[in-house]
Amino acid sequence: MHLVTFERPSDHSTPNDSGALGDAAMGFESLEPVRPGSRRLGAVVSIGTYAGWLVDLNRSLAIKLAYDDVGAPEVEANSMVPSDMLSFLRLGPTALQAAKIALDFAIETLDCYNAPDFLRAGAVEPADRVRLCAPLPRPGKIIGASHEDLALDASDPEDSAAPRLFMKAPSAVIGPDREISLPASEHRVCFQGALAAVIGTRTRNVSVADALDCVAGYCAANDVRSRDVEDESVGRSCDTFAPLGPWLVTTDEIPDPANLGVRSVISGDVVQLSRTKEMRFSIAQVIAHVSTTMVLEPGDVILAGAPSGIEVSEKEERWIRDGDIIEVEIESLGRLRNYVTSAKSA
C-alpha cells in the first residue's frame, strides 16, 4: 500500500452529499462534512480507471461502517484508522489491516458508483486536487548513517565496523514539491539521496536478521546538509533540510530493500546512479546498530547512508543553489522532487 499524508486546499469544497449515492447511502447522512485545510491520511489507488486517486482512509472506513450500521461510525473509524500517520503507526498491524479494508471498500465503491458521487461523500480525491505532505510530517526521531567514514566496533560480530550515526531534527521535515530554503549565512550546502525506513514496532537491541521486522514501510529521502556548520547533526537539521516522500510504501510491497535503484538529479544533471546493495551498510545493519544505543519507536525514521556514485559534496561547483530542482528517485518508492530557494533572495 502507498500511504500518503495530504491536505485539501482551504478553498476546497466537498459537501457531505449523501443523497448522491442513492439508497445505498442511507445510514451515513449524519457524518460530519469534510473539512478543508486539515491533514489527512490516505492511500493511492493503484489499479483501475481511478489509478492515482487518493482515498481518505478514515473517511472511507467511516462510510463503510455506516453502511454496516455500526453505531457512531466516525468515532469507531477514528479508533481504527486515525487521520494522522504517527497515530496510525502507533496502533500497529491492526490499523494497517483496517486501512486495507478501507482502501478495498473505496475501490469497490468506485467500480459500483459514479466517482463524483463518492468524491462528494469525501472519501476520494483526484491527486491534482490535493497537496501532498511528507508521509510522516513530524517523525519521532530521525537517525542516519554517515557514508563518509567508519567507526570501528569490535563488539559487532557481523561486521568489523559500524556506521557513524548522526541525527536530524524532526522539524526539518518537508514534503514533495516543497522548497528547500538555504540559510543566508551558509554557502556550502549539499545533499544525498537516501533510503528511509519508518519504524512501525517498538524495538531495542534487534539483530540484523530481525531488524526489518520492525519496519512499517519505506520512502525516498533527501539528506540535505550545510558544511558551513561544524556539528554534523546541526548542519543537517536546518529547517527544510529533510524532505521525505512522496509516499510511504508498506513492507509487503518491498520484499528486498537491499536491492533498489537510486537516482539523484540536480537541475537536470544526474549525480547519483546506484543501487542500495552498494551501500556500505544495509538498512537492516543500520537499524540493528541504532537499536543498540536507543529504543526505536513507531514513527522514527532511519536513513541509510548513500550508495556509491554521489559526489555532490566533494566539488564546490555542485553546492546546491537558489533555483535548483532536486529529484531523488528510488525504485518502487517514487520520485521526491524539491525546489531550492535562498533566504538572500526572499
Image: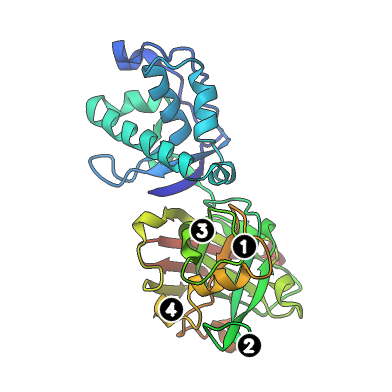
Quadrant of the image for the C terminus? bottom right
Position of residue 237 measured from the top left corner of the image (x, y, whole percent): 69, 66
Amino acid type at mark 4: Asp
Q: Earlier in the sequence, mark 1 or mark 2?
A: 2
**Could you classify mark 2 by the number of other residues whose Cα lies within 10 Å: few (under 14), some (14-19), or many (20 or more)?**
few
SS of the residue at dot 3? helix
SS of the residue at dot 4? strand
Looking at the image, residue 235 sits to the left or right of residue 202; the answer is: right
Looking at the image, residue 192 sits to the left or right of residue 106; the answer is: right
Amino acid type at mark 3: Cys
Cα distance in 3D space between marks 2 and 4:
40 Å
Kindly identify which residue carries mark 1.
204
Kindly identify which residue carries mark 4.
269
Cα distance in 3D space between marks 4 and 1:
41 Å
**Could you classify mark 1 by the number of other residues whose Cα lies within 10 Å: few (under 14), some (14-19), or many (20 or more)?**
some
Amino acid type at mark 1: Arg
Cα distance in 3D space between marks 1 and 2:
20 Å
Kindly identify which residue carries mark 2.
154
Amino acid type at mark 2: Ala
**Could you classify mark 3 by the number of other residues whose Cα lies within 10 Å: few (under 14), some (14-19), or many (20 or more)?**
many
- Of the two numbered discs 2 and 4 in the rendering, the one whose residue sits closer to the viewer: 2
- Of the two numbered discs 3 and 2 in the rendering, the one whose residue sits closer to the viewer: 2
- Of the two numbered discs 3 and 4 in the rendering, the one whose residue sits closer to the viewer: 3
Contact between marks 3 and 2 (CB within 8 A): the answer is: no
Contact between marks 1 and 2 (CB within 8 A): the answer is: no
Kindly identify which residue carries mark 3.
214
Contact between marks 4 and 1 (CB within 8 A): the answer is: no
SS of the residue at dot 1? loop
Q: In terms of image quadrants, where is residue 25?
A: top left
- Of the two numbered discs 1 and 3 in the rendering, the one whose residue sits closer to the viewer: 1
